[in-house]
Amino acid sequence: MPATAQQNVRVPVEQGGRTIQLSAQLFRPVQPTGPVPAVALFHGCGGPGQNTARMAGLLASWGYAALVVDSFSARGLKDVCGRNWPTQAAAEARAGDIDAALAWLAQQPGIDARRLAYMGYSYGGGVALLRALSGNPDNRSPPVARAVVLVYPDCALADPLGQRLAVRQPTLLAMGALDDWTPVSQCRALLERVVRGQELVETKVYPGAHHSFDALGLPVRYLDGVGNRSKPGGCCGAHYGAHEPAWKQFVVDVRAFLDKALKL
């Protein structure tokens, strides 16, 4: 018997005075015992891929619903990894996809709206930071999501949030020690600006791993034409590719983190 049940769905999101229907795939546990927690996944600059689908399948096998959101197709985008790396404005516009996906999940039968989380990868991780962090450290309103997982996130996208930040929910950062596309140093600098909720942040740095350490089967290589916000002028070049030991530990870490945060 398969571990998951998979369904193509549409998630409406408001943008510029009109409604965009985002393509998405919903993975569910085959034999749930009641309303299940749910995790929304947001891809990197190359669009949805095998890594997000693989993670969604794992989540479903652990008892979660998982929604893989395609932020690009409905907007006529395919890959934005080139020299014109996504702008701050584009990232802020995409952050609305997180709100829309969580609202959609909360309305679905068989999903526990009190136990929602989201994961963002690379560019999508930077976008997720815009929702995971608050630029107002006195903001104590309860977050919609109970947990956030940021996978080699573009931490530079959170720079405009200011120098005093707050974390309002358990947040896991998972990064490769050798990442030169979204380097660990940028995320550490970001975390130094967190003045409230620092105890909610868990950081995992995997030795020997580059960007996209979860791209199983893809040898590490150097892309000389990709935009890189960590370099002067935002250009260019970075390494990416799989690191299986990091991937295996990442899976263990994510499961333990979510099970604790969502009390599965």
Image (tube, rainbow, N blue to C red):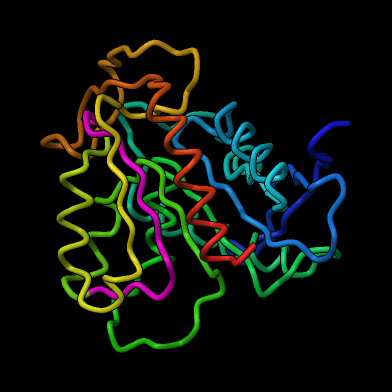
Name the residue located 33 percent from the left edge and 63 percent from the top edge. 201
In this view of the protein, which residue sits in the foreground, 77 or 81? 81
In this view of the protein, which residue sits in the foreground, 224 or 76? 224
User: In which image quadrant can residue 72 be found?
Assistant: top right
**In the image, residue 91 lies at what x, y percent?**
41, 52
In this view of the protein, which residue sits in the foreground, 45 or 59? 59
**In the image, residue 90 lies at what x, y percent?**
42, 51
Name the residue located 35 percent from the left edge and 45 percent from the top edge. 153
**In the image, residue 243 lies at what x, y percent?**
38, 21
User: In which image quadrant can residue 218 be found?
Assistant: top left
Name the residue located 42 percent from the left edge and 35 percent from the top edge. 249
Residue 100 vertical placement versus 204 (above, below) = below
Left or right of 55, for residue 66:
right
Name the residue located 36 percent from the left edge and 86 percent from the top edge. 139
Left or right of 75, for residue 203:
left
Residue 15 vertical placement versus 245 (above, below) = below
In this view of the protein, which residue sits in the foreground, 113 or 239? 113
Residue numbers of the magenta segment: 165-180
Left or right of 227, for residue 111:
right
Q: Quadrant of the C terminus?
A: bottom right
What count of labels does the image hold? Answer: 0
Residue 79 vertical placement versus 37 (above, below) = above
**In the image, residue 206 lies at what x, y percent?**
30, 35
User: Quick check: is 135 in the magenta stretch?
Assistant: no
Q: Quadrant of the N terminus?
A: top right
User: Quick check: is 179 in the magenta stretch?
Assistant: yes
